[in-house]
Structures are given as structure tokens and as C-alpha cells.
Image (tube, rainbow, N blue to C red):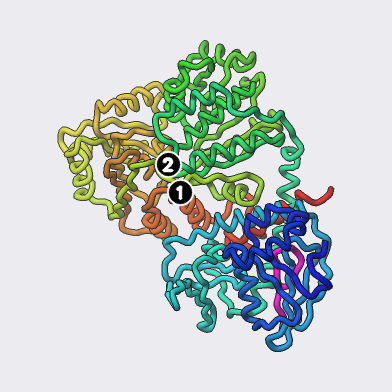
Amino acid sequence: MDLSTEHTRIVIPALIPYFVEKGRLWFQEHLQELLQAQNTQAFFRDNLALIEQGQQCHLSEFLRRLDELGYEKVLKVEQPGEFSHTGGIVEAFPLFMEYGVRFEFLGNTIESIGKVDTDPQDEELTRKILTKRLRNEKLFSDIKDIKEGDFLVHLDHGVSRFQKKETLNNQEYYILEYAAGDKLWVPTGLERKLSRYVGFTDPHIARLGSLLWQKTKRKVREDAEKTARELLETYAQKEISLRSRYEPESEVEAEVASSFPYQETPDQLHVLEEIAEDLQKETPMDRLVCGDVGFGKTEIALRTMVKAVSNGYQAALLCPTTILSYQHFQSFTERLSSLPLRFSLLSRLQSKKEQTHILEGLKTGTIDMVIGTHRILSADVSFKNLGLLVIDDEQRFGVKQKEKLRSMKSSLDVLSLSATPIPRTLEMALSSLKKISLIQTPPPGRIAPSIIVAKRGTNVIKEALIQELKRKGQIYYLHNRIGTIYGVQKRLQSLVPGISSRVIHGRLPEHKLIEIMDDFRSQKFSLLIATTLIQNGLDIESVNTIIIEDVSLLGLGEAYQLKGRVGRNSSESFVYFLHGKNLGEKAKLRITALKEADVLGAGYRVALRDLEIRGAGNILGKEQSGSVNAVGLNLYCQILSEAVERLKGMPK
């Protein structure tokens, strides 16, 4: 469809959800109304550009207008939403047109408007790709708390250093510095074209306006398409699997929701809506819910499992530790015991006789939900009609473990929960293979813990212990060596005489672990000395100080998870990251990242930072890391995501 009149005028709509969601036919039918609305309504004046042959317009103003409309500058125009510039010629591919358009300038006049030979575009596929791009831009354009000297990526101009913010004529700008002192002023409101640079080396910064950036993006797109083909082959079986659509909310689901003792946060409600949309489709769900510790991921899991049971399926919740599975079982019992739902705990806590009974119930369908550890993955476990697998703290499981249950049933819905997803899973989430949901809003009244980074010493430890005991609180002390952990207990007891303490570690019998944790929850003692066994999911509101003896021995994700063991109520809480005299370079980077993550809801950013420090996971090998370094992880993920969508939509 040609929206021009003999190519004497062209209407260019902005790349915004309002227009992208409309169809080509709708735009054609309402074109005159839209042009009339331009005269009276600021929204349409800002988001539509009417370009006419013979129009007086400075070339730089025309390019800036395309930028404001959200179009991406490329080397060669091939897709809707792109533009290129060479000399006095600008080529653009407006939304809703079947081909690109060439604008030839003579001085400050648009002398002619002509057609550019571009491949035919499938309208529905274009809509999906542009919708994905807009979502990704929103996801990645979070540049709050950007600091002077940080690397930023501009979609059209490449990698730069952020210099400062400055106000000129009542307009605030981000000032970006390029090679040779070149500067770019980006007005606030156009952050969608900016993202943080995350890579594995310091990036190359080029001159502003050079063709190098457009050539780099083109090469990265070619590489991303190869990667996308490989990924799609891997997930082909899942894509063709179908199951029955889920029904709308049942009475049981409504009753469970009404029994929630807290007010849901807006993010929680949004994630529940996204999951409901996934389950109302015929293709299986594969979604990652990334939310900070204590932000309500368990409630999301519980309600989704109840929804699965209400639709005739069985549901399984896979936990990394016996302690966490036991805690979840207790929570489920409190919430669901009055409802006609049958659920069980399956771990090493049960006797052989109890386990045999549970296995029979899963096989015959008399048990609706099971909560358990790796025991769920054992060969003797079979289900009558497993429909949903929820993986809690998914970063603790290997790929083979997570794929085992999925391989049993290709139409299995999978919901993964994580505060700091491992790089591999994060990559899959951001590249369209797995959908991602973010819970970034803290529960009402929650206060971020105070972070203290210090050299390990008697005085700082003693002061931290006494301070918490004075307000009748409890303390976690992390010492990650089983061989010396009881010696640490004696040392701490001599440091603060009369302090009551217990020790837990992974070699204790399961029943002993549960007994100690129950006593700690009941406040029968004040100090729990533990290994990293405590990092996953424990929710004890009376514990508001954690002392980590040597943070340099921990990964960034581990340290961040441990930080989340405190600050789970409205009381002031403290996290002590202690270290020795000599820190390695990566340990210093991890500590810096932890200091920067001193606000609630920083887990997602920590995951990105973790990727930067550790390097990519299984998906990004040496071949892809070069592309990531060239454009930054955020932009690479956007490009890979679009490549996946495009290949998925192409005829086989």
C-alpha cells in the first residue's frame, strides 16, 4: 500500500506502541483524521511527520526529526523503522509502507521523494519485531544513577562516555563524549536510544558521525542471525508442542488470592497478568521472573501452581535445598490447608514408607502439587499429568537438571524464579527464547539494608554483634568452611560472652538442619553460624544483621543473595561484607558492584554486572563475545532478540 500521493508527500509515524499496534489498513483509513488532529493535538503533532516535495527543511533538522520519531540510523535501509544518510540523500523506511523512501535535498529544500528498492515486509512479522524492540528499549534504557565516566551506548552513534547532565534553554541534556573530544547532546525524553554498556573489555570509542558504528552494527546483526538459527534449532521441539489453553480464574484461585495477607505490589499484579496470558495460549510457557529477594516471587509461584491444578494438571516446585523446600511446604500448608488441594513435600526428610506413598500419589494423580529438592528428578518419580514446573532459585540448578523434567513432556509449562539469574539464563531471557518478567517494586514499608564493607577484624565483628543484641535481634554469621566452622563458634562466643549460638552446614542430617532452623525462627538462640546453605529463600523477619566473613570467596550472585537474608521487614538492617588485606581484581569489582546495589530491587542490575565480571555463560562463546564487546550486551541482546523473532516469523 502506498500512503503517498505520487511521491509528493510522505507521512512518517513515530515508532511508539500506539502506532505499532495498529495495522496498515487502519492507518490508511484514518490518515486524513490523523493529519487534521496534528493541527489541534500535541500528541499527533509530536508523533507524526508530514514530509512534502519542495518543503523548506534543513538537513540536520530532518535527521533530528527522524531520531525523535524513534527511527534507527543504519548503513543501509532494509526494515521498517530505519533510516540512513549519505551526503544530501536520506533514505527511510516509514512504518506502514511496503518499501523505503529516498529524500533528496538541494540546499535546504527537499527536491524529490522517490522509492527505494527494499524486500517486501510481512506486516504481522514487522509488528511483532517492532513491539519486541520497543519493549527491549524500555527494558534496557534504565540509566538511572548513571555516573560520570560510565560507558553508554547510543543506538545511532555508538559507544561513548557519559560526561554530565546539563540544562540549556530549559531543556535538560545528557552529554556524551566520543573520540577526539566529539560531544553529543541527547535531550531527556529520548533515553530509549541509550543503554548502559556491559561488556567483557573496555569498549572502543570512535569519532562521532563516522561510518564505523553503522558497519559494526551490520556485522553484529549478521553474527546474531547465525546464533539465532542455532538457538531456534535447539528449541524447535518446544515451539511445535501444544497443550490446551488454560481457563480463566477459578473460584479456588480467587480464594487463594483473597487469602494473601499483604497488599500485592503493582509489579506482582503485572507479572500474574503476564503469566495468565502465557497460559491462555496453546504454546507452553517458559518465563523467568526476576525479582529481588523478599519481593514476592513465592506468591507468584503458589498462585500459578493453583491455576495449573484448577486446569486439571499437576504442578511441581523444585527447590535447591531441603531447608527451602521445607519452608515452602510450611507456607503452602498455611495458605492452602482449608482448600480441596492435595500437596506433599518430597525430600530426604520423609521416611522410605512416606516417600513410597507420595510417589504412588504422583503416579495416580491423587497428589496435585509436590514441593521438593533434586529428589523430584529421580528416576523413580513419575507423574500422571504434570503440567507445570516451577524452579525456585533457578541459578542453583544446572542445565541438565532443569531440562530433565522438560524432556519428560515437551508441552510442560516452566516458570523460573530468581533474584540474580545466572548469565546463561539471562541471555536466553533477553534473546526471546525465554520471556522475562521483572518485579522491581518493594513491598510497602521495606527499607534497604545498610552495607558496610570493611577489613575483617575483631572490633568490627564484636561491635556488629553487640549492636544487634542490644535491640534483641538475631544475626547470621557466614563462614563457608565446614572444617573450621565450630572453631569460629567458640571464637565468637568468647568475643561476646553469653551469646547463644548454633551451627549449620551441609553435612548435618536433614532433620537436624530443620530442627536448628525451627529453633532459630522461634528465637531460641541469637546467632546462627552457617555456610552458604542459608543463601536461598530463608525468610526470618527477626534477623536483621548478617556478617559475611570473607566476601572475596563468594560470587557476586551469592553475595547478593546473602544480602537478601536481612531487611525483610520495616526495621533497619545491616550487611557486613568483610575481607582480608589483599583483594584480587575481580573481587574488587564484585565489592564495588555490591556497594552500588544499595537500593531495593537492584538484583536485575546485579545480574547484568555479574555477567560483565564473569563473562558470558554457555550461550555466548568466544564467537559471540566479540559482538558483545563491539556494541555492548544490552544492544546485542536487542539485536539477537529481533533476529530470533524474524526467523521465527519467516516461512519454513
Q: Is residue 343 above or below residue 107?
A: above
* Residue 69 image point, x, y percent: 63, 67
What segment carries the magenta color? 75-86
Q: Secondary structure at mark 2?
A: loop
Task: Identify which residue, 327 or 477, lies in the foreground.
Answer: 327
* Residue 249 image point, x, y percent: 58, 28
Count of labels shown? 2
- Tell me, yes or no, whether the two marked residues, 2 and 1, touch with CB atoms within 8 Å: yes
Question: Residue at label 1?
Answer: 603
* Residue 648 image point, x, y percent: 75, 49
The amino acid beneath tag 1 is Gly
Which numbered disc, 2 or 1, marks the residue that appears first in the sequence? Answer: 2
Image point 64% across, 30% down: which residue?
A: 405
**Placement of the N terminus among the 4 image quadrants:** bottom right
The stretch drawn in magenta includes residue 315: no
Image point 54% across, 21% down: which residue?
A: 252
Callout 1 environment at 10 Å: few (<14), some (14 to 19), or many (20+)?
Answer: many
Callout 2 environment at 10 Å: few (<14), some (14 to 19), or many (20+)?
Answer: many
Left or right: where 585 falls relative to 94: left
Image point 20% across, 35% down: which residue?
A: 472
The answer to whether residue 425 of the structure is visible from this angle is: yes
Question: Residue at label 2?
Answer: 293
Task: Identify which residue, 557 or 652, lies in the foreground.
Answer: 652
Q: Is residue 418 above or below residue 103?
A: above
How far apart are labels 2 and 1 at the CA level? 8 Å
* Residue 87 image point, x, y percent: 71, 84
Q: Is residue 356 above or below residue 176?
A: above
The stretch drawn in magenta includes residue 78: yes
